[in-house]
């Protein structure tokens, strides 16, 4: 079990996780009872569920904690926004090392089928079947900077402003923290004058394909990075289809996938 936990949660990731996890509450200070399951083993079990796509009940007992314990800890950490905070810590580490390229960022979305829950809606590209949509902005290298979810019938253009505002202040190798792209690339789903004006008012240049004027293929040499990141997100099989009733749990799995992408880059450069 130790080798599996070490592979899923290496020492570097564990040290970053310890900086954001809320302190453990002692329910029985007088002692007695069963020993609390370790956070590292529980985190490894959560990552296993995210990457393998298995259900909570199918979680193998090799990790130690029982699946109800793992699920309760997952729900607790999701309410505390641990995954978003850990993602930001990883972005800070990458930014301090100069690994984030703000010169050209890209925005896109992808729809997945949803079995149930809030923030679902008829997917206009999948015969009206219920679905949810993942929105994201990446830097020039394809590292996720901002994430969001919505019903599948929400138009892509409505996700641009919340995503740009959702980029956290991230450390830089030199100078103050940064949170605005130098230039933002998007497909025809974002072709609206009010979005262009909004980006210009914040000093963000834009390159958005125009409907009935130009082909979105011309932006492929810059937008392909965000499409590659979408395929990286699909590496977490739990995102192939939404099974979570609560949208915050689905967003948590999206955040886990994003932080794993950032941690892989961080591991390669260290």
Image: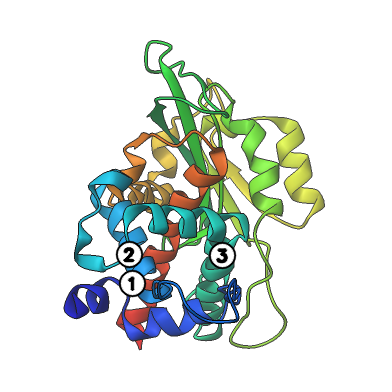
The answer, for residue 260, to whether it is visible in the render is: yes
Q: Nearer the viewer, mark 2 or mark 3?
A: 2
Does residue 233 appear left or right of residue 248 in this picture? left
What residue appears at the point 44 percent right and 30 percent down from the top-left corner?
215
Question: Tag 2, which secondary structure?
Answer: loop
- 1 or 3: tag closer to the N-terminus: 1
Mark 2 / mark 3, whichever is N-terminal? 2
Within 10 angstroms of label 1, few (less than 14), some, or many (20 or more) residues? many
Where residue 82 is drawn, which disc sits there? 3
Q: Which residue position holds label 2?
A: 65
The residue lying toward the viewer, choosing from 112 and 195, is 112
How far apart marks 2 and 3 lie (CA) works out to: 20 Å
Which residue matches tag 1?
Answer: 41
Looking at the rendered image, the quarter that the N terminus falls into is bottom left
Tag count in the figure? 3
Q: Are marks 2 and 1 in contact (CB under 8 Å)?
A: yes
Q: Where is residue 24? Give x, y as percent.
A: 57, 75
Q: Residue at x 40, y 78 (%)?
A: 13
Q: Nearer the viewer, mark 1 or mark 3?
A: 1
When the figure is inspected, residue 219 is found, relative to residue 181, above or below; the finding is: above
Name the residue rendered at 55%, 73% in the picture: 21
Q: Specify whether residue 54 is in view.
A: no
Residue 66, quarter of the rendered image: bottom left
Question: Considering the image in quadrants, where does the C terminus appear?
Answer: bottom left
Q: Observer-nearest residue: 192 or 33? A: 33
């Amino acid at each position: 079990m130790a080798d599996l936990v070490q592979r899923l949660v290496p020492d570097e990731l564990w040290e970053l996780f310890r900086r954001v996890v809320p302190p453990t509450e002692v329910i029985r200070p007088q002692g007695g009872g069963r020993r609390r399951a370790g956070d590292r083993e529980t985190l490894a079990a959560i990552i296993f569920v995210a990457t393998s796509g298995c259900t909570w009940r199918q979680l193998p007992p090799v990790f130690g904690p029982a699946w109800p314990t793992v699920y309760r800890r997952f729900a607790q950490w999701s309410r505390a926004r641990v995954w978003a905070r850990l993602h930001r810590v990883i972005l800070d580490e990458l930014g301090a090392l100069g690994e984030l390229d703000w010169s050209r960022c890209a925005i896109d979305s992808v729809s997945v089928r949803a079995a149930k829950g809030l923030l679902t809606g008829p997917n206009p590209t999948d015969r009206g079947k219920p679905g949810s949509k993942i929105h994201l902005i990446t830097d020039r290298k394809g590292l996720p900077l901002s994430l969001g979810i919505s019903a599948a019938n929400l138009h892509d253009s409505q996700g641009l402003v919340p995503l740009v505002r959702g980029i956290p202040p991230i450390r830089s190798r030199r100078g103050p923290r940064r949170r605005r792209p130098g230039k933002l690339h998007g497909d025809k789903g974002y072709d609206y004058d009010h979005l262009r004006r909004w980006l210009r008012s914040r000093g963000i240049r834009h390159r958005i394909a125009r409907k009935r004027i130009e082909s979105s293929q011309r932006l492929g040499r810059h937008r392909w990075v965000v499409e590659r990141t979408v395929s990286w997100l699909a590496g977490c099989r739990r995102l192939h289809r939404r099974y979570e009733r609560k949208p915050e749990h689905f967003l948590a799995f999206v955040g886990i996938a994003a932080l794993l992408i950032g941690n892989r880059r961080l591991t390669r450069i260290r």
